[in-house]
Amino acid sequence: MIKANVILDYPIWKQRIKKPYSYIQSKLKKLSKAPNFKNKKQEFTIFLTNNKKMKILNKKFRNKNKTTDVLSFPIENVYKKKNYIGDIALSFEIINKRSKFSTFNIEFDKMWIHGYLHLTGFDHKKFKDFKKMTKKESLIFNYLNK
C-alpha cells in the first residue's frame, strides 16, 4: 500500500481540508487498488505549508528566490529507507488561489499527484517527458475522482 505522512505547518489548511491526513489516506487507499499501483509499497511525506516557507525551500534547494506551488524531494537510492521515496511540499496560497476556478480539493489533488510523480521518477524538462507526465497525472486524477 502507498502511505503518506502529513505534516501541517500552516494551520489554515484545516479550513479547506478538515482532516488532511485522512483525506490523503483515503485517496492513497483508492490509488493502491488501481491496476498499475497494486502491491506497490511506498511511503512519502506531504508538508502542508505557505508561500513564505515555500520561498525559503525553493531558494535553499533550487536557488530560486520565489515561491512555488509544489516542491518534490526524491530520496536518492543510496539513502532510501525501506520503501520511503521522498517528500513533497505544497503551498496553501497558490492552491487556494487556483481553486477560485475549480475547487480546493481538485487543485490540491492535482498538486500532490504532480509531486508524487516527481518522487517516482517523472520529470517535465523535455517536451516528450512533459507529455508523459501530464498523461499520467490525468490518469491518476481521473481514477481518484470518478
Image: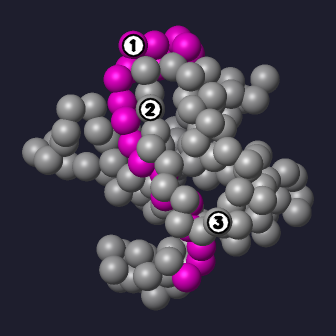
Pointer 1 or 2: first along the chain: 2
Identified by mark 3, the residue type is Pro
The Cα atoms of the two marked residues, 1 and 2, are separated by 12 Å
Residue farthest toward the right in the current orientation of the protein: 101
The stretch drawn in magenta includes residue 47 = yes
Q: What element carries label 3?
A: loop
| Marks 2/3: CA–CA distance | 22 Å
What kind of element bears circle 1? loop
Quarter of the figure that contains the N terminus: top left
Which residue, given by chain and number where applicable, does mark 2 sit on? 3
Rendering coords of residue 13 (x, y %): 68, 60
Q: Which class describes the residues within 10 Å of circle 3: few (<14), some (14-19), or many (20+)?
A: few
Relative to 121, is 26 above or below?
A: above
69 or 44: nearer the viewer: 44
Highlighted range, magenta:
33-52
Mark 1–mark 2 CB contact (< 8 Å) = no
Q: In this view, does 32 lie to the left or right of 77?
A: right
Q: Nearer the viewer, mark 1 or mark 3?
A: 3
Residue at (29%, 38%) from the top-left corner?
84
In terms of image quadrants, where is residue 141?
A: top right
Q: Which residue corresponds to mark 1?
A: 39
| Residue marked by disc 3 | 11
Q: Is residue 23 magenta?
A: no
Please indicate whether residue 109 sits to the left or right of residue 75 in the image.
right
The residue that appears at 79% across and 69% down in the rendered structure is: 97
> Alpha carbon of mark 1 to alpha carbon of mark 3: how far?
33 Å
Report the residue at 56% width, 22% height from top: 29
Disc 1 marks which amino acid? Asn
Amino acid type at mark 2 = Lys
Image quarter (top left, top right, bottom left or bottom right) of the C terminus: top right
